[in-house]
Amino acid sequence: MPPASGTVRELVEHYRAEILPDHRSGKHTGRLLDGMLRTAAFVERPALSLTEEDFEKWFKARLRMRKRGGELVKPSTVLFELGTWRRVFNAGRLNGWCGLTRRSPNPCTELNLPKQNLEGRPVKMVTRERMLEGTNGRVS
């Protein structure tokens, strides 16, 4: 069994080695994990020490980061990454990696996330015909 002081980076490496090979999207998720390890300040901390507040801080900081092209990271991207963190911690809990147990709380589950501000986003106009395209004329 891995030592109780396993870091978040070690937890991610367990996930990468033991879970991702069985996934169809394993290659894509592996690249996503690489980026997540670069952007999270807590990767060298023990996995057991992380709290919901750590992930709330990460979430807010991640929303302020910019992509290579200079535009801000989209909230949907950050939510997707949060889901990946959640899966990594759940796998760690189920497999006993880095000192986590089934009773260890998952710090990603009960977050108080800021509401997404949708103002200023483009509204996609869709015609009635386009909306009804998939109904084959059947409308309730």
Image: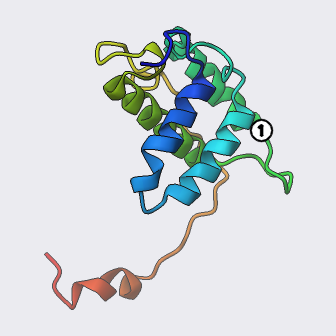
- In the rendered image, residue 121, in percent from the top left (x then y), is placed at 64, 56
The quadrant in which residue 92 appears is top left
Judging depth in this view, the residue of 140 and 6 nearest the camera is: 6
At numbered mark 1, what does the secondary structure look like: helix, strand or loop?
Answer: loop
- In the rendered image, residue 50, in percent from the top left (x then y), is placed at 54, 13
Instruction: Work out whether 126 lies above or below 9.
Output: below
Q: On the image, numbered disc 1 is attached to which residue?
A: 65
- In the rendered image, residue 1, in percent from the top left (x then y), is placed at 41, 18
| Horizontal arrangement in the rendering, residue 62 relative to residue 2 (left or right) | right
Does residue 44 appear in this view?
yes
Q: Residue placed at 31% from the left, 27% from the top?
A: 94
Q: Amino acid at mark 1?
A: Met
The colour scheme used here is rainbow
Judging depth in this view, the residue of 116 and 49 nearest the camera is: 49
Instruction: Work out whether 82 lies above or below 118.
Output: above
- In the rendered image, residue 61, in percent from the top left (x then y), is placed at 71, 28
Q: Residue placed at 84% from the left, 53% from the top?
A: 68
The quadrant in which residue 55 appears is top right
Residue furthest front as drawn:
1
